[in-house]
Each structure stands twice: as C-alpha cells, then as structure tokens.
Image (tube, grey):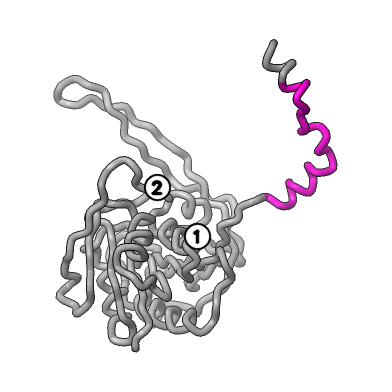
Amino acid sequence: MKPRILVTNDDGVHSPGLRAAVEALYADFDVLVVAPERQQSAVGHSITLHKPLRMEPVSVGGLPVRAFQTNGTPADCVVLASLVDPPAPQLVVSGINVGANLGEEIFYSGTVSAAMEAAIQGLPAFAVSVAGTEQVFFEPAAAYVARLARLLLEVSLPSGSFLNVNVPNLPAGELREARLTRLGRRCYANQLEKRTDPRGRDYYWFSGEPCEADSTPDTDIGAVHAGFISITPIHIDITDYALLERLSAEAHRFSFGEAQVAGDAGK
C-alpha cells in the first residue's frame, strides 16, 4: 500500500507548482490534494472560524489523484484533509510555491503556515518554494520534493518540527546540492500608497522591498543566493530562551501581587 501524502499550497489548486509536485509524487505515493480555490499568498496562519468551509472535487492536470479545492486558507486545508477524508496523511507537502520564503517571510507565508499547521497536528511536513517569480524552473524542485518525501518517511522529524525548503530558480544542471541552514534576516521596507478609485473614494496599496540584514552563507538567504537548496528546520516553539534566562534573573520585577494589581487599578 502506498504511503499517503497530502499536497497543499497557498498559490491555489490550479497553480503550476502544485501540479509539478503532484506529478513528481503520484507514482510512488497515494496523493491527496486539498488546496485553496484561489491565490492566498501572505495569508499567514489564519484559520477560518466565521464562515462555512466547502470542499469541491477538482482535477489537477488530469492526473489520477483525488483532489479538492476549498474556500479555506492553507492551514484550513491541512485540518480539512485530516478530518474530512481520513485516515490522516503520513506526510504533508506544501508547495511548490512561486517565490522564496526566506527569513521573516515564514511568518507571513501561507505555504509555510500549512506545513506549520501539520506540525501542530502532529504530522511530519515540509514547505517548498522556488526563489523566482518569472520563468520558474519547477522540475528541479519537484524532483527534490519526491526525494525528500521518501527520506522523511524513513527519518522521523521531532514533534512540533517541520522543514522549510527553498530552491534557487535555476536549471537542474546549475543547481547546487542541498544545505542545512538557519533562518536569515529579511525584513521589508514597507510602503503604503494612497490612491483614489473612480468614485472618488480613497484606497491604499501595500507594498515593500526586501532588505537583507543577515545573509551569511549559513543562512537560508545566503545558501539560495549561492545556488544551494536551503533546508531550514523550524519548530513551532518560538520562545526566546536566551531572553527568558536573562529576564529570570530579575523575575521579581515582573511579579505583581494582588495588592499591587488592585493599587494600580485604582489609579
């Protein structure tokens, strides 16, 4: 019996990246696709609570896999797949995303959030993105997806952990091997442009350019810039343990007794 894999994304069920991943996986795995019906980039880890969720059968490039589109978010897709169409998958693959998810981008990415939701649900997972938005080379990334999927069914990930994979947008012959990396720093210089619609109402267009504050060779950013596939282990526990230890030395300053709270409330 083939191992069951859930494939999802944030680019939408009809994205070429998702199809490339499915094409690379369906021969060796029991592939289930549950993906958003439309583009959901940068939705982060949102979960739908205030509207009904629907799942509709759909074809993914005519491939022989069960596939559904939903009006939910990427994180919703993982929950839906596990609860609506049991048994739960043995592995979750989120992608292949168009555009990199490096550094702080993981906190905004729907692609990464789907893999994170899988980790929360106790499922091994990885997110995979190609660092390009035009003339994207999906084939090398898809080949690596299949290779990594087979590996992760043999090598267990720790509870609460998943992998964030970024592949340079290069042909197979120019792509370098995979490297284990840490997150770099890739913040954005945010811009907010005010415009006016034809009816005279103001609206705002949000944009920003990345500014890399840490892109040394051991980071995901540095590896991808040098042509290497980047594999960054991520854990859902984002506690700052160094700061926790430092603040513990002055824990008494953060402690408020009932009398202090009552006194402050009366001011």
Residue contact at pointers 1 and 2, CB within 8 angstroms: no
Disc 2 residue crowd, few under 14, some 14–19, many 20+, Cα 10 Å: some
Residue sitting nearer the eye, 262 or 4:
262
Furthest residue in direction bottom, as rendered: 1
Image quarter in which the N terminus is found: bottom left
Depicted 43 relative to depicted 6: above or below:
above
The image quadrant that residue 143 belongs to is bottom left
Q: Secondary structure at mark 2?
A: loop
* Residue positioned 54% across, 81% down in the render: 155
Furthest residue in direction top, as rendered: 267
In this rendering, does residue 98 appear at all? no
Disc 1 residue crowd, few under 14, some 14–19, many 20+, Cα 10 Å: some
Task: In the rendered structure, find residue 105 and report the number of the disc placed on it.
Answer: none
Q: Is residue 252 left or right of residue 43?
A: right
Q: Is residue 231 left or right of residue 209?
A: right
Which residue is label 1 attached to?
120
**Does the stretch in magenta take in 242?**
yes
Q: Tell us which disc is closer to us: 1 or 2.
A: 1
The image quadrant that residue 19 belongs to is bottom left
Q: Secondary structure at mark 1?
A: helix
Which residue is label 2 attached to?
46
Q: Which residues are magenta?
A: 240-261
Say which amino acid is labelled 1. Ile
Depicted 256 relative to depicted 136: above or below:
above
- Give percent across and percent down for residue 139: 31, 77
- Give percent across and percent down for residue 126: 45, 68
Q: Is residue 63 left or right of residue 245?
A: left
